[in-house]
Amino acid sequence: MTVLLGCIADDFTGGTDLAGMLVKAGMRTVQLIGTPAGPLPFNADEVDAVVIALKSRTSQVDEAVAESLAALHWLQQAGCQQFYFKYCSTFDSTPRGNIGPVAEALMQALDTDFTIACPAFPANGRTIYNGYLFVGDALLSESGMRNHPLTPMTDASLVRVLQQQVSGQVGLADYGVVEKGAAAIGARFAALREQGCSFAIVDAVSDRDLEAIGAACADLPLVTGGSGIALGLPENFRRRGLLARQVSADALPATGGLRAVISGSCSVATQKQVALMREQAPAFHVDPLQLARGDDVVAAALVWAAAHVGQAPVLIYATATPEAVRTVQAQLGVERAGGLVEQALAEIALGLVKLGVGQLIVAGGETSGAVVKALGVSGLRIGPEIDPGVPWTTALQEQSTALPLALALKSGNFGSEDFFVKAWSRLS
């Protein structure tokens, strides 16, 4: 048995988002933190899909391309039959990339001249109509993403956004085609290829649309999008007799230990989650200006945590309003401000685990990447969903009598307002 689907995610929470969707659809899935240096760090007979999570969303274009190609090569060596480039459901990128350049590089490496781009995720309010991306009822350009500190999205037309980033032509498979089902979608793909298009932005407003789009992608070597398309891909392998109907793809080993939340995201959704948890649990704020002054905020946070973590789940957060973020960035610069916070939260996470925390929620893609690196986590086994796009996971580990570390890596934009409060109930 070989791994069927090989996935490359441009950040860590995006990786768990995709992996969680695949598990829901019945594929036993492992997420790896970065590209392994050696062979499979798991039993291939027990895994149907592998997600390699990179930290390439906001890196330099050349670096993002190189890392993605290295991940692709490893997945090819693992025997994967189809490949998936996963990015955020809000298409986070700049006019230079990184979505377009990475996708084109992967296409060239796979010797294919056509793929799709579909970040739709209706369960989380991301829909595409006439090529325009909506967040809830608002155009992407009128949502909170217009103020994103690293990838401000000021144009909701995915055709225009992607066309700025690629050399090939970008076409559209609109909703009038999508609502007719997989055969009509496939015919539209063929027509776009004949017209010389290398990419098709694909409309989707429901899970049924995503399932039809996934079916139409059965023969594409490469699929690109958010995690939503994952709903439709597993059934393609079942039709070919390669995938059984799993009933326990989300089973995790038992976990234990103390509970904590670390939040570095400043998204609107996470701000609400932090505000609600602060009303119900002890909370400690990490101030980037104090970090810049050289104050030992990490030590202070861990002393505070030691006094509180045994009583209830604790919250340690750097989450702030867009206005507060801009004030800090004006003083420190965007990269320095983000780097200081990520490093501090990662060190705090390591300290919390040493204090006995065994169940840890991390909010924010960049923060999650820094935390798993600090913890030395090489991979994750994907478990039950907490909210759409956010599963619990356990860290892959060598044979040990210790309970594995449970991690929930949450994209800043995802999760209900009570996410931090209710998440623990999903762990056995």
Image (spheres, rainbow, N blue to C red):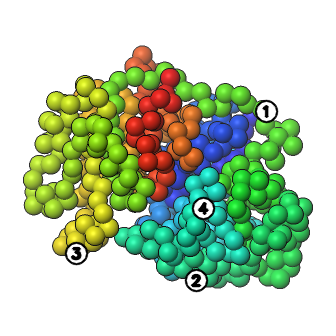
Q: In the image, what residue type sits under mark 2?
A: Gln
**Camera-side mark, 3 or 4:** 4
Is 351 on the left-hand or right-hand side of 15?
left
Q: Earlier in the sequence, mark 3 or mark 2?
A: 2
Pick out the residue farthest to the top: 401
Q: Earlier in the sequence, mark 4 or mark 1?
A: 4
- Residue 308 locus on image (x, y percent): 20, 31
Q: Which residue is mark 2?
A: 164
Q: Which residue is mark 3?
A: 330
Q: Which residue is mark 1?
A: 244
Residue 4 can be seen, yes or no: yes
Looking at the image, residue 331 lies above or below residue 384: below
- Residue 117 locus on image (x, y percent): 67, 67
Q: In the image, what residue type sits under mark 1?
A: Ala
Q: Earlier in the sequence, mark 1 or mark 2?
A: 2
- Residue 362 locus on image (x, y percent): 38, 44
The dot on residue 126 is 4
Q: CA distance from mark 1 to mark 3?
A: 54 Å
Q: Secondary structure at mark 2?
A: loop
Looking at the image, residue 284 lies above or below residue 396: below
Q: Secondary structure at mark 1?
A: loop
